[in-house]
Image (cartoon, rainbow, N blue to C red):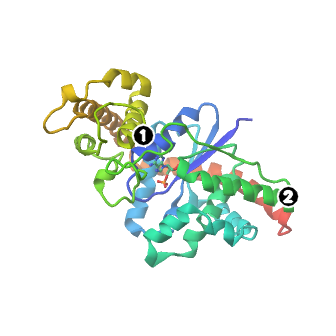
Amino acid sequence: MNKVIFSGVQPSGNLHLGNYLGALKNWVALQNEYQCVFCVVDYHAITVKQEPKILREKILEIAKLYLAAGINPETAVIFQQSRVSAHTELAWILNTITKIAELERMTQFKDKAREHKENINLGLFDYPVLMAADILLYDTDLVPVGDDQTQHVELTRVLARRFNQQFAEVFKIPEPYIQKQGARIMGLDNPAKKMSKSAGSELNYIALLDKPETARKKIMKAVTDSGSDIKFDPKNKPAISNLLIIYSLLAEASVKELEARYNGRGPAYASATAGKYGEFKRDLAEVAAKFLEDFQQKYNSFDDKFIEDVLEKGKIRAEAIAEETLKKVKKAVGLA
Ligand code: AMP
């Protein structure tokens, strides 16, 4: 039997290059070796306020973005979380073996509670337990995510082991899969903070559905560091290092190659408007614009009807697997 990878993205905000380079791109790279299960985690999204009409649109949009990134809908299971009730059922059972102190330690909860002071709800607190249920229902081997999710996958492993010990060996213990490069793409306007859908400024991120021209402008406006070398040095040159990683992953060229290509060029190629890193930024702007053009061409080739079909088929396949696991869980606990 093929090993399983499971991952998910929330249908909220605008998916950006960080999501693509940190998560989706890796899903595509792994999809021939693994049975893939990719979820649109709508129940996670509603832990912060969503506009109902937009949420509905975003659910289809995320599924379409999965396909545009290159996920094969013939082999991967692509589905909407809220349509498979086993997720919330298992989350409830896992709640009973989760300690409040464990959830209080979650940095994403602390960050989001700070961001949404007016809406620190129980769902937001319980978010990691629902995520554990997502993963554990599918006998998942590997969870490819960006590094902001490491703590959640760790908690998943703790809960799985605890359940197995307390009741019966039901769950496989999953491993996080976090790329060395790209696991944490930083904001274009502030390289000290990760690129984020919920960032205050549009200049923080390049959305996958941004116009190529917009992306060009955002790259040209991205902050840079002092000095003029194009050098990978996250400590002293966080902005240029971040741009180098983005360039490297989009152009499939190593950071070393890029450093060699641009080394020493900075000041000589400076332009009045672009600043001293001008040549480098102009080239990266082209690479990013071309990437978005190709990506969006693919995105626009799928109509909503096709996506609805993919989600419907995915729901049936996901439900069959999830119900099987849930049955074992209920039996182990004594509920059935
Ligand atoms: P989210 O947008 O929070 O649903 O995240 C979807 C996926 O993208 C998760 O695997 C995240 O870890 C990943 N991700 C989000 N932001 C970044 C970032 N700035 N760099 C790399 N990966 C990210």
Viewport quadrant of the C terminus: bottom right
Residue assigned mark 1: 68
Does 195 appear above or below 21?
Answer: below
Residue assigned mark 2: 165
Badge 2 residue CB within 8 Å of ligand 1: no
Residue 146 image offset from top left, x and y in percent: 53, 47
Secondary structure state at the residue bearing disc 2:
helix
Q: Foreground residue, 20 or 62?
A: 20
Residue found at x 28% / y 31%: 280
Q: Are marks 2 and 1 in contact (CB under 8 Å)?
A: no
Q: Foreground residue, 188 or 268?
A: 268
Does 62 appear above or below 260?
Answer: below
Q: Foreground residue, 221 or 299?
A: 221
Secondary structure state at the residue bearing disc 1:
helix
The residue carrying pointer 2 sits among few (fewer than 14), some (14 to 19) or many (20 or more) residues within 10 Å by Cα, namely: few
Residue 321 image offset from top left, x and y in percent: 70, 50
